[in-house]
Amino acid sequence: MDDGETAPPAAKRRNQKKSAYYIPKELVREILVRLPVESLMRFSCVCKAWGSTISGDASFHRAHLRLQRPLLLVSPQTTAVYGGVHMKKMILYGWEDNQQGTSTPLVHARVRAPTLSSPFRMHDFAHCDGLVLLGSTEAIVRVINPATRSVLSLPWGGCGAMQLHQAFGLGQDPRSHAYKVARCFVTGDKHYKTKMKVFTIGIDHCWRQTMTDPPYPVAARRTATFFKGSLIWTIHESTLGSPAPGFLRFRLDKEDFVLMEPPPCYPRLDYAKSALADLRGELCLACGGGDMMTLDMWMCDNMENPQWDLRYKIDVPPHMPPDFSPIASFGDQIVFKEQYLRTGHYDLKTKTYKNVLWMEDLRCHNPISGKTKYKERHFDNIDVIPFVPSLIPV
């Protein structure tokens, strides 16, 4: 064929047809990163390249996480006896405001955890980038990704017999981007000492004890708040025997302890009746006002030199932390977890509060009872935490 001749019409059509099916890899990535986790789990089987990106690309996981819509993770908990052993059953549900009164999607199936005794309260859940630290009173600790349904059971921590005198935390090391579980516990027979052990997910095979011990005891079964690379624990004043000087901050990159100054509450901060939360990138401390008729919400965004700002005073008596605590912020609303198995919203514009979710009104399939509607007698506790579906592996 001469250079001046054009390709035959049939060959030209074949070339056009072949090029029509080509999609640049960059465009495929931009499409995939916007899809929900459930769809991506199916698409990972389409081809080897997609599977490698979806399952093993850390930069893709972080980009996908930034585009996901946050929701609430609701966990009704029941206690049953099997062969004389008390078992905690937990069911995890994703919940959004527009699902009120409708069927709630099941995020994770039943999780069983043996307890020491049914009256003991489990530690609260913790969430970081789609990973959830499950509440437990047992020696084994579990971290799960409810979106991918993967579960990691951490090994025995060797923390002695005083398992109830423990407090946990989950967060990400800002330097290595690894996720770490921290376990603060008490050891000793007569002279108690506070210790800390750390487990790095994907790296460690056993718990590591920190080089230095925590300088203050922390409140047992009160999960730490993760904020900007650190875990913030509430100091246990009763064990300390004197007023707490602040909050105990554990830096995940250096794995050391720093004292974080509290806000200038009047007359003084009651640590046992306070609650910490990460709200829109700021650390929030909720506590009773000086007259105990309002809930004060102090905000801080600087960890190195805390400058607390009394941002909100909410008129919601007689509710006070820890039974009434902020857990998340969506738009102009702050979500609170209440006692009596319910959650509510405080509208920052209208300055009004309303109950949003009562567990007795939650309609969803319950694999324990086989029913589609919970009744209060069917469970003994509820945990509600903010949650973002992600592909982060455990």
Image (cartoon, rainbow, N blue to C red):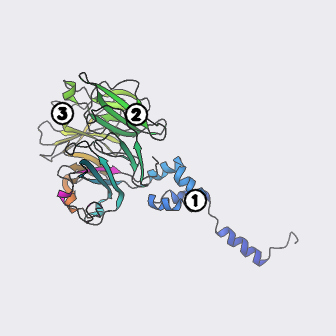
**Residue 27: numbered disc:** 1
**Spatial distance from mark 3 to mark 2, Cα to Cα?**
29 Å
Judged from this view, the residue extending furthest toward the right is 2
Residue 198 is labelled as 2
Image position, residue 116 (x, y; %): 25, 42
Kindly identify the residue that appears in the image at 36 percent across and 27 percent down: 257
Report the Cα–Cα distance between label 1 and label 3: 54 Å
Q: CA distance from mark 1 to mark 2?
A: 40 Å
User: Which residue sits furthest front?
Assistant: 83
The earlier-in-sequence mark between 1 and 3 is 1
Range covered by the magenta-colored residues: 364-387
Q: Is residue 41 left or right of residue 295?
A: right
Q: Callout 1: 10 Å neighbours few (<14), some, many (20+)?
A: few
Residue labelled with disc 3: 270
| Residue depth check, mark 1 versus mark 2: number of the one nearer the observer | 2
Amino acid on which disc 2 is placed: Val
The answer to whether residue 252 is magenta is: no
Side of 143 relative to 89 (left or right)? right
Looking at the image, which residue sits at the far bottom?
9
